[in-house]
Image (cartoon, rainbow, N blue to C red):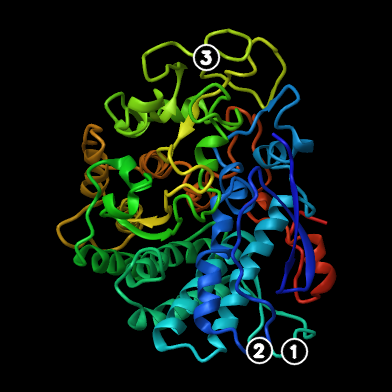
């Protein structure tokens, strides 16, 4: 991998920041300055949907700090490839500091959304546009409060020399909930590529589940009242007619805007014209000699692979329009790989391209470093549109909603619609052919089901923190990490210009 630094301006603080991307994203910012008289709320919302929010689609920044810090993604150094001065490794090992590029990049990216959404609210928006801006701002603030426990903001953008204020902890999460509940009535029913009622309900579910974590990260408590709010919003989503998509991977395909019946909020991409770096979800994992040719980087771990029943199609399957054209299966790739004619592929040295279950943080054996690790293809590749793929990026969907409702019942909420934790989990499992669980569902089993259903979708770290498992060892992080790792450090550059921010415990 070549490490590419991109320099941009974050309007929120006026700071320069560095990010990283394998692929240059085509951000279509409509803003030329906060006082531009000809810029409308319509322009700004478009810039968020087709620009700012696409930062979530790359393999760096927000996705990197949510997934590489968990137990499903590892970015091994492969000889001279993918070391990048250890930027991936320190995330996996929980040894990052306040100068980590991706933590800083994520913080800045969220700040752009918050700033631009606030700007839209000050440009005479329609009631629907105001609701959309509030949802988008709350979406970014959710990650701020959950990940850093602090969310910088400005209520008035007329004087950018004023130091941003900061919401913290439970006050910040309560503000998010208040904003979302105020926005909900004015939001439209669709489309899913824009802020809508069901997206708002799903984000409210996450906020109510996270309240107990934010209130006490050392020993989270979840009140029955909060869990009943999770259940209420789940039932409202179910009442709109959302159903699980029969084909699991259709939710992520290049035609997911048509095929998915469960996606609730997606980042829209325009095949062949304009898109974020959603293709990183398969390029970062695939070998150079596969189709499409990848970057031979990230893998998952064997204990995650072992969580799947052999009948569970989420673990891997052939996919029409991909496997018959390229030989590539979707899901988790282990063992010998083949082309569309059934011919066994080779690595660059002519050895069998057979992915192994074992992987280390640093691979040094020149005979195996190209094939170590189980590869992941969550989004069926768009083989026709080049860099600008047509797969819309999935943020929120019904599979997640059903499992959140199951969790809320397990944490003390009142069951509704004749659904129990067991029946909800089994409804998700049945879609992919996994055998039904029997009896009851433990917290560990529920977390494992979230792992199987939502792998590589950017929620794993948040789930592990909520279930008290984030600091546990993994196959490549052999010792438990310190509890202070549950929060990210405030980037040093941000603290330097905003005295209202306080560094989180455990960081300097």
Q: Is 500 drawn above or below residue 301 in the view shown?
A: below
Q: CA distance from mark 2 to mark 1?
A: 7 Å
Whole-percent x and y of residue 437? Answer: 24, 36
In the image, what residue occupies the spot 55% across and 42% down? 280
Q: Nearer the viewer, mark 3 or mark 2?
A: 3
Label placed on residue 156: 2
Q: Is residue 317 positioned above or below 142 on the image? A: above
x, y percent for residue 231: 29, 64
**Label 3 crowd bin: few (<14), some (14–19), many (20+), radius 10 Å:** many
| Total marks placed | 3
8 to the left or right of 439: right
Q: Residue at x 44, y 51 (%)?
A: 271
Quadrant in the picture for residue 381:
top left
The alpha-carbon separation of the residues under discs 1 and 3 comes to 58 Å
* Residues at circles 2 and 1 in contact by the CB criterion of under 8 Å: yes
Q: Earlier in the sequence, mark 1 or mark 3?
A: 1
Q: Which residue is mark 3?
A: 353
The residue pinned by badge 1 equals: 159
SS state under label 2: loop
Asked if one can make out residue 72 in the rendered structure from this viewpoint, the answer is no
Q: Nearer the viewer, residue 95 or 288?
A: 288
Q: In the image, is residue 407 above or below residue 500?
A: above
Q: Kindly indicate the quadrant of the structure image that contains residue 371.
A: top right
Residue at image location 30% in from the left, 41% down from the top = 248
């Amino acid at each position: 991998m070549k490490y590419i630094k991109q320099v941009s301006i974050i309007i929120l603080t006026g700071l320069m920041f560095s990010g990283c991307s394998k692929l240059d994203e085509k951000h279509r910012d409509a803003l030329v300055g906060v006082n531009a008289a000809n810029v409308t709320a319509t322009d700004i919302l478009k810039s968020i949907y087709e620009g700012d929010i696409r930062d979530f689609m790359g393999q760096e920044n927000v996705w990197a700090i949510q997934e590489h810090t968990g137990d499903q993604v590892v970015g091994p150094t492969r000889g001279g490839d993918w070391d990048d001065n250890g930027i991936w490794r320190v995330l996996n090992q929980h040894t990052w500091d306040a100068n980590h590029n991706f933590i800083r990049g994520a913080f800045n990216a969220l700040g752009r959304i918050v700033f631009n959404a606030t700007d839209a609210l000050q440009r005479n928006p329609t009631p629907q546009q105001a609701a959309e801006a509030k949802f988008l701002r709350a979406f970014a603030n959710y990650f701020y409060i959950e990940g850093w426990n602090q969310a910088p903001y400005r209520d008035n953008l007329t004087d950018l020399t004023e130091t941003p204020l900061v919401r913290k902890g439970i006050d910040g999460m309560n503000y998010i909930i208040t904003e979302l509940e105020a926005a909900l009535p004015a939001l439209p029913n669709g489309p899913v590529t824009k802020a809508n009622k069901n997206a708002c309900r799903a984000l409210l579910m996450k906020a109510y589940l996270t309240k107990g974590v934010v209130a006490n990260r050392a020993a989270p408590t979840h009140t029955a009242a909060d869990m009943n709010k999770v259940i209420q919003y789940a039932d409202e989503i179910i009442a709109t007619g959302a159903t699980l998509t029969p084909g699991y991977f259709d939710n992520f395909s290049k035609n997911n805007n048509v095929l998915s019946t469960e996606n609730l909020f997606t980042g829209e991409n325009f095949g062949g014209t304009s898109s974020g770096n959603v293709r990183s979800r398969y390029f970062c994992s695939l070998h150079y000699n596969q189709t499409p040719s990848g970057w031979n980087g990230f893998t998952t771990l064997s204990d995650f692979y072992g969580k799947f029943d052999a009948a569970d199609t989420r673990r891997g399957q052939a996919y029409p329009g991909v496997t018959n054209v390229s030989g590539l299966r979707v899901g988790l790739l282990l063992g010998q790989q083949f082309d569309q004619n059934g011919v066994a592929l080779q690595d660059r040295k002519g050895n069998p391209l057979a992915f192994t279950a074992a992987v280390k943080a640093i691979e040094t054996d020149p005979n195996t470093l190209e094939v170590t690790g189980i590869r992941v293809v969550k989004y069926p590749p768009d083989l026709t549109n080049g860099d600008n793929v047509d797969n819309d990026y999935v943020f929120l969907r019904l599979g997640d909603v059903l499992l959140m409702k199951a969790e809320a019942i397990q944490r003390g909420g009142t069951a509704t619609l004749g659904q129990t934790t067991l029946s909800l989990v089994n409804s998700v499992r049945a879609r992919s052919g996994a055998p039904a669980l029997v009896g009851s569902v433990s917290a560990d089993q529920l977390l494992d089901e979230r792992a199987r259903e939502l792998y590589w979708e950017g929620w794993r770290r948040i789930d592990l923190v909520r279930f008290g498992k984030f600091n546990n060892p993994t196959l490549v992080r052999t010792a438990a990490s310190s509890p202070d790792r549950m929060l990210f450090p405030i980037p040093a550059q941000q603290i330097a210009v905003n005295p209202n921010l306080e560094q989180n415990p455990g960081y300097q």
